[in-house]
């Protein structure tokens, strides 16, 4: 075990701002050092460019992603004035989890050299260090503090320290090498028999308070959830490799009755017959660790995905004749309380295999006693039966609106307790991380004997007021005789196309996606791009399911319910012609090019650098293609710095309008072919309150 503790997540509510500044600065550099040290385990540059598994990017992406995350978030927060490398900050921006709109086609990525990324990381560290040194600091640090995005980016890198270690473990051994900073546990033997212990009933109250929690937290940790947990039985220890061998030897992987429908589909696709990190060598078993292969340590926890854990529980239930299953999140918190656990100490190693305090691997399941149980926290994450859901009062942080919301889909189950490499926020009691049920992390499980848990909490976030309003704005009723705005713009664009090619169109700033579908009536392929993952998810949902359901505010707490179907709008037939993805209009990926039409609706006055977008948009259009810009020109400094406004001010003593700015910026590469035209729109807020706005539309043709 290392004598140097990996620094814990800082306290944010002290009384000495300069001491906190020094602590955060040290935390930043310690995190970056450890992350870069992890990538030193790769055996040569080639290892960076080969995918460990098909559904994730090669490791060069993750080496650069966390560094560009710092810059992208700090630019968005207005804390950095300039980017370090816009190309890298676009290439490494998004595409981490296998969401339905992610594009993991290698042909779309021109990965930079390792040395180039290493140099970028150095420059990022210098820039952030200077920011930490000069940024005013007032305690406590909360969500609205300028320091929050700095902490966000540090904790984000610590998450990827763990997830990247999993990918390195999934790499072929020839691409990795042992490293003195990453020594595994060398203790192993036979485990004691597992046993069931009673856990008395009791209440749990979950959720952080925005006002007074002392540590950084992700959005899903805030709010409130309270429940009474009935008494149950829980396994004293995590399921060991030896205990899981009984399931394998009994033919559990081949017995359909033990698997859920989703689990069967995964098993058929993967052809799994044993845990992913188990290796059969003749009559013997071995275990793949992060950097080496070792004889099977039978008393270590088995590491499996949620499907495998559930199948084991079904097998155990049949053997015991009792209702065996995974614990819920609430039941895990009861275990935590009954075991008398506390947070990882700042000044000594944890009494758990957590925070890299006890080596770089799991260890024996009986090693860390916590009350009457072992490993309630630490060693490996523990799968639960609970899909992640928002607590009452959940709010999205505006700087990272797609951290949690895309996982509120019923397909991401919570893991609890942390693993040997879970550090910083990951190691806290309040941590809430969730993964797709087929994903592999450093995760195992313990089982409980208990009744059927309550149905998962509904987590569809269409109850979010803004999203519901935009769902209605795009797919709902028309008000006061004003035509549907996205459809009106799509019709205007299509009418102007005349006999021009109609192959590909881009709906930039697509929001909930109505114009994307309307354009698909006339184009072969339409891509909807928006900065907000929350809006993108609306388009993805209705494209996949053909229906949106949402709640509208009528008056006070009174609401009404809406269901909108593409078929009712005559758009069901074009679902296969649209795609949605997240993107920054000021820093689009190179793949977004070759369009015959670009629609930018109510976009330019919400960009942080509209001139940058307009000066390069011609590169995205085919010669002769059309650009439709519509905007009410509501310039606001919270969206666009005053010096970046395109118009709406006096210039050389004369009024300078946004249209003047558009003419000046676009004149070199475009000619105005139609407009300006007034296109009104109405957004319903409540049954008695509506926004009535007029957007000015102009159509521009790219010059040959």
Image (cartoon, rainbow, N blue to C red):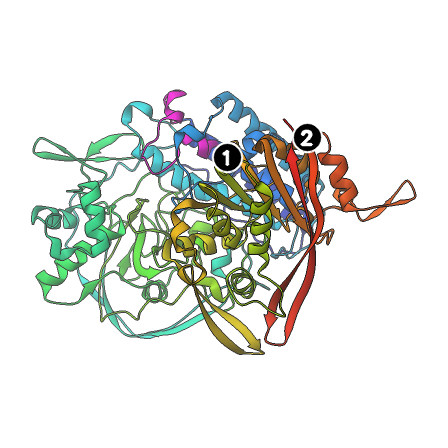
Q: Which residues are magenta?
A: 41-63
> Which of the two residues, 330 or 71, is positioned nearer the viewer here?
71
Q: Is residue 7 visible?
A: no
Q: Residues within 10 Å of mark 1 (few under 14, many from 20)?
A: many
Instruction: Give the mark toward the camera: 1 or 2.
Output: 2
* Residue at which label 1 appears: 92
SS for tag 2? Answer: loop
SS for tag 1? Answer: loop
Q: Report whether 448 appears left or right of 456.
A: left
Q: Position of residue 381 (x, y in %)?
A: 33, 50
Q: Which mark is residue 669?
A: 2
Asked if labels 2 and 1 touch by Cβ distance under 8 angstroms, the answer is no
Q: Which mark is residue 4?
A: none
The image quadrant where one finds the C terminus is top right
Q: Earlier in the sequence, mark 1 or mark 2?
A: 1
**Would you place residue 52 above or below residue 304 in this image?**
above
Q: Residues within 10 Å of mark 2 (few under 14, many from 20)?
A: some
> Which of the two residues, 488 or 64, is positioned nearer the viewer here?
488
């Amino acid at each position: 075990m290392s004598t140097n503790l990996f620094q814990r997540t800082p306290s944010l509510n002290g009384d000495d701002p300069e001491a906190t500044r020094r602590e955060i600065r040290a935390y930043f550099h310690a995190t970056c050092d450890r992350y870069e040290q992890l990538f030193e385990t790769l055996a040569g540059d080639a290892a960076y460019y080969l995918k460990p598994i098909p559904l994730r990017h090669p490791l060069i992406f993750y080496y650069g992603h966390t560094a560009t995350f710092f810059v992208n978030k700090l630019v968005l927060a207005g804390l950095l004035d300039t980017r370090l490398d816009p190309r890298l900050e676009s290439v490494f921006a998004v595409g981490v989890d296998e969401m339905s709109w992610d594009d993991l086609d290698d042909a779309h990525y021109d990965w930079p050299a390792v040395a180039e990324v290493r140099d970028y990381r150095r420059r990022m560290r210098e820039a952030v260090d200077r920011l930490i040194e000069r940024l005013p600091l007032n305690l406590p640090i909360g969500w609205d503090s300028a320091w929050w995005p700095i902490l966000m980016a540090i904790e984000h890198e610590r998450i990827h320290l763990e997830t990247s270690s999993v990918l390195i473990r999934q790499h072929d051994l020839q691409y990795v090498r042992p490293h003195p900073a990453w020594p595994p546990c060398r203790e192993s033997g036979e485990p004691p028999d597992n046993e069931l212990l009673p856990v008395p009933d009791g209440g749990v109250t979950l959720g952080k308070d925005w006002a007074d929690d002392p540590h950084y937290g992700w959005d899903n940790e805030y709010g409130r959830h309270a429940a009474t947990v009935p008494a149950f039985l829980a396994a004293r220890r995590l399921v060991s490799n030896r205990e899981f061998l009984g399931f394998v030897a009994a033919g559990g992987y081949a017995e359909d009755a033990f698997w859920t429908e989703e689990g069967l589909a995964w098993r058929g696709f993967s052809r799994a017959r044993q845990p992913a990190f188990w290796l059969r060598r003749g009559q013997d078993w071995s275990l793949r660790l992060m950097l080496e292969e070792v004889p099977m340590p039978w008393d270590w926890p088995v590491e499996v995905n949620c499907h495998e854990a559930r199948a084991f529980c079904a097998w155990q239930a049949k053997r015991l004749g009792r209702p065996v299953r995974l614990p819920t999140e609430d039941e895990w918190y009861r275990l935590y309380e009954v075991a008398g656990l506390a947070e990882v100490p700042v000044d000594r190693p944890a009494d758990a295999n957590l925070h890299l305090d006890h080596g770089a691997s799991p260890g024996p399941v009986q090693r860390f006693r916590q009350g009457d149980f072992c490993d309630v926290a630490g060693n490996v994450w523990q799968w639960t039966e609970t899909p992640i859901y928002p607590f009452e009062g959940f709010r999205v942080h505006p700087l990272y609106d797609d951290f949690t919301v895309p996982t509120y889909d019923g397909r991401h189950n919570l893991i609890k307790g942390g693993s040997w490499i879970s550090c910083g926020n990951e190691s806290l009691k309040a941590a809430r991380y969730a993964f797709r049920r087929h994903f592999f992390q450093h995760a195992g499980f313990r089982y409980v004997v208990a009744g059927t848990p309550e149905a998962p909490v509904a987590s569809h976030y269409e109850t979010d007021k803004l999203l519901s309003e935009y769902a209605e704005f795009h797919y709902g009723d028309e008000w006061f005789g004003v035509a549907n705005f996205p459809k009106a713009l799509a019709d205007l664009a299509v009418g102007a196309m005349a006999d021009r090619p109609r192959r590909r169109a881009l709906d930039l700033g697509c929001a909930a996606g109505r114009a994307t579908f309307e354009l698909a009536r006339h184009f072969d392929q339409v891509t909807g791009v928006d900065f907000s993952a929350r809006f993108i998810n609306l388009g993805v949902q209705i494209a996949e399911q053909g229906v949106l359901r949402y709640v509208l505010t009528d008056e006070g707490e009174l609401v009404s319910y809406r269901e909108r179907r593409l078929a009712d709008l005559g758009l069901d037939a074009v679902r296969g012609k649209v795609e949605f993805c997240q993107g920054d209009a000021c820093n689009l990926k190179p793949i977004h090019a070759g369009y015959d039409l670009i629609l930018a609706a109510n976009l330019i006055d919400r960009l942080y650098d509209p001139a940058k977008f307009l000066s390069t948009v011609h590169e995205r259009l085919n010669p002769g293609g059309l650009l439709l810009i519509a905007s009410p020109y509501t310039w606001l400094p919270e969206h666009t710095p005053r010096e970046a406004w395109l118009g709406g001010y006096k210039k050389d003593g004369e009024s300078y309008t946004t249209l003047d700015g558009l003419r000046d910026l676009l004149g070199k590469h475009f000619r105005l072919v139609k407009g300006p035209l007034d296109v009104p729109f109405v957004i319903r807020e409540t049954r008695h309150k509506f926004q009535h706005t007029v957007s000015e539309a102009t159509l521009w043709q790219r010059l040959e």
